[in-house]
Image (cartoon, grey):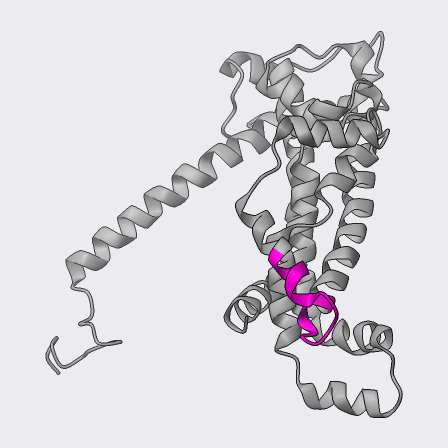
Amino acid sequence: MSRQQAMVGGMPPPTRLESIVKAIFLTAICLVVVVPFIGVVSTSLASPEQVIKAGGFVLLPTHGIDWSAYRSILSGGTVTQALLVSGFITAVGTAIALFLTCALGWALSRRGSVGNKALLLLVLISLLFNPGLIPSYLVVQQFGLLDSLWAVILPTSVSAFNVIVVRAYFVGLPSEILDSARIDGASEWKLFWHIGLPLSKAVVAVVGLFYGVSYWNSFFGALLYLNDSSKWPLQLVLRTYVVNGVEIGAQDLGAAGEALPPQTSIQMAILMISIVPILCVYPFIQRHFAKGVLTGAVKG
């Protein structure tokens, strides 16, 4: 069979040279992504002597694994406190955001409800216009949320994009199931809670991942609204000690009087602590990702 006859999707298959070039190009991209990550993991686990000898960046630890950097940052100091704060913000924020987003998406998907079009228009307008930094700060201040963790959670608890995705998914639910439940006397709340949500696990999982990653990685809201450093989330600590290069001492780590590993090892360990939770959660959500996003986007 000739190359012209072996058409795949209306296009001829690539030549051997094209395949080799693509393989080399993709391999190079993978190395650019993977090698720095390996270096971060290795530096956080390398012995202090090897880190000092390598000048601060170790590609592969050759003297065994050393957990001293992780023991230092998890010994009850600033990083431990920030980790607990981030966990609280992520868990509570994601739960509140999911409930509000799904409830609003359900209300907007019921075409005959009062004020449906006006409310949908407001959601769509919020996609185009941002209120700005100063008005947002003034609103948080007027509600008395400054220097409170709720200032980081509540202002971003509803995303217009996520509402549109959830609404599109709810619109695509089989009307026959909903109608039969109404005939049996189910209220709108029971339709939402016992039928809408169970049939929408894919989109709920994906939107929950979006919110969880957003809350876990957020630092600007904390930088803007939180003055008490004991309430800082992990990402703000990461920005202070890793991005800005501020040296972290034994008092900050709750390890007064102990010899600390090199600063580079501590910084890479903080970086790994900030990455690992999302890496652990993502594999359980990934199988819903394509279905939740594509179905919600196509059926709108």
Q: Which residues are magenta?
A: 107-121
Outermost residue, top side: 257
Q: Nearer the viewer, residue 71 or 176?
A: 176
Q: Is residue 256 magenta?
A: no
| Residue 184: quadrant of the picture | bottom right
Residue 162: give x, y in percent of width and height: 63, 56
Q: Nearer the viewer, residue 264 or 279?
A: 279
Determine whether 262 is above or below 279 in the image: above
Determine whether 93 is above or below 48 in the image: below
User: Residue at the location (75% across, 85% down)?
Assistant: 178
Determine whether 9 is above or below 155 in the image: below
| Residue 256: quadrant of the picture | top right
Q: Is residue 110 magenta?
A: yes
- Looking at the rendering, in which quadrant would you find the N terminus? bottom left
User: Residue at the location (70% across, 91% down)?
Assistant: 176
Can I make out residue 66 in this image? no
Say left or right for 295 vs 99: left
Say left or right for 172 vs 204: left
Can I make out residue 229 in this image? yes
